């Protein structure tokens, strides 16, 4: 049966010649015929992709809007040698053995407008391709992003969103932090990794602090100000100067258990009365001091430069 299919395919290829390798030169009838050649062997790809967003590439409306007649050859390139060789890879782009640059450039031919900075992202710089996270043919749970199914690598991972499960496949340590009692609510579905991180763009710690680039302030608007008296740590170092962004065993997701210990990591020099005036008396305010009992508006204040009540 396979030989019969190959024979039919070869006959059709002889009829269409090398035009099947160039998506730009095909008219509508030739496009349908070329797609039929691919379907003869790759029926499973067509069946799984019927509800796939990429199926829009074969719609006349898409071709009319873009002026490009995209089909299988639009992504996989020249299929002539592949078909005439009885299935050998030839010049076909199989998205497996090609270089990272070649695979990503092919995807970005269409997706560059939505992900213009992907080549400078940490994922691209680490050698990942678009197909490391996305399956271009599969239709996963109706998700338009066509995410690959991520392995469940952490306890309770089956309750995580599809995005977070995928991220957990590589970022296990970060996802494990969400098991702490003080954490962002990933397991409850309130948000996922992509709520704070853009996997297609360069990641900068300034996203977690500083003016104009505050990812945290998108949700925690009351902490963002602007204030008359700013807490420099939040404006320079960012929220992670005091908080563990994923999760922490400490209340308010603080990086230290004791508030005083956290404050003294920056404020080593304090007014004399904090320590006391007697060289033999106990220190008035130490590592166990709850600094926010007095400095209650610690994120910023419109009334007091020392963030007092």
Image (cartoon, helix red, strand yellow):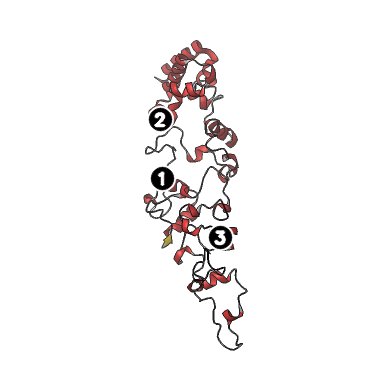
Which residue occupies 59% across, 35% down? 101
Query: Which is nearer the eye, 7 or 110?
Result: 110
Where is residue 275 shown, x and y percent of the image? 58, 81
Query: Which is nearer the eye, 168 or 203?
Result: 203
For the residues labelled 1 and 2, say whether their Cβ atoms are less than 8 Å apart: no
Where is residue 79 shown, x and y percent of the image? 52, 21
Task: Tell me if mark 1 has few (under 14), some (14-19) or many (20+) residues whose alpha carbon lies within 10 angstroms of its own.
Answer: some
Q: Secondary structure at mark 2?
A: loop
Q: Secondary structure at mark 3?
A: helix
Q: How many marks?
A: 3
Residue highlighted by disc 3: 234
Residue highlighted by disc 2: 49
Query: Which numbered disc, 1 or 2, marks the residue that appears first in the sequence?
Result: 2
For the residues labelled 3 and 1, say whether their Cβ atoms are less than 8 Å apart: no
Task: Tell me if mark 3 has few (under 14), some (14-19) or many (20+) residues whose alpha carbon lies within 10 angstroms of its own.
Answer: many
Residue that protrudes farthest toward the top in the picture: 15
In the displayed structure, 144 sits above or below 91; it is below
Where is residue 39 shown, x and y percent of the image? 42, 22
Residue highlighted by disc 1: 162
For the residues labelled 2 and 3, say whether their Cβ atoms are less than 8 Å apart: no
Could you tell me how far apart the alpha carbons at marks 2 and 3 are, in whole angstroms?
47 Å
In the displayed structure, 62 sits above or below 95; it is above
Residue 22 is at least partly visible in this image:
no
Q: Secondary structure at mark 1?
A: helix
In the displayed structure, 306 sits above or below 63; it is below
């Amino acid at each position: 049966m396979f030989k019969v299919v190959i024979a039919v395919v070869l006959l059709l290829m002889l009829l269409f010649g090398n035009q099947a390798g160039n998506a730009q030169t095909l008219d509508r009838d030739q496009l349908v015929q070329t797609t039929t050649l691919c379907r003869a062997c790759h029926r499973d790809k067509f069946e799984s992709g019927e509800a796939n967003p990429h199926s829009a590439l074969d719609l006349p409306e898409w071709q009319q809007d873009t002026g490009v007649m995209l089909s299988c050859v639009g992504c996989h390139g020249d299929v002539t040698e592949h078909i005439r060789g009885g299935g050998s890879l030839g010049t076909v782009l199989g998205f497996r053995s090609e270089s990272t640059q070649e695979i990503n450039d092919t995807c970005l031919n269409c997706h560059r407008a939505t992900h213009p900075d992907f080549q400078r992202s940490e994922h691209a710089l680490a050698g990942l391709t678009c197909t490391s996270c996305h399956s271009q043919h599969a239709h996963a749970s109706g998700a338009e992003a066509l995410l690959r199914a991520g392995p469940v690598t952490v306890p309770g991972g089956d309750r995580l969103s599809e995005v977070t499960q995928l991220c957990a496949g590589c970022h296990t340590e970060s996802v494990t932090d969400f098991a702490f009692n003080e954490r962002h609510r990933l397991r409850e579905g309130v948000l996922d990794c992509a709520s704070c991180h853009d996997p297609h763009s360069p990641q900068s710690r300034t996203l977690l602090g500083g003016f104009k680039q505050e990812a945290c302030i998108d949700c925690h608007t009351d902490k963002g100000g602007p204030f008359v008296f700013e807490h420099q740590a939040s404006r320079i170092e960012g929220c992670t100067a005091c908080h563990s962004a994923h999760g922490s065993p400490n209340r308010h997701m603080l990086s230290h258990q004791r508030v005083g210990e956290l404050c003294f990591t920056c404020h080593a020099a304090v007014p004399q009365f904090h320590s006391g005036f007697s060289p033999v008396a106990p220190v008035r305010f130490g590592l166990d001091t709850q600094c926010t009992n007095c400095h209650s508006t610690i994120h910023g204040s419109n009334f007091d430069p020392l963030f007092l009540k």
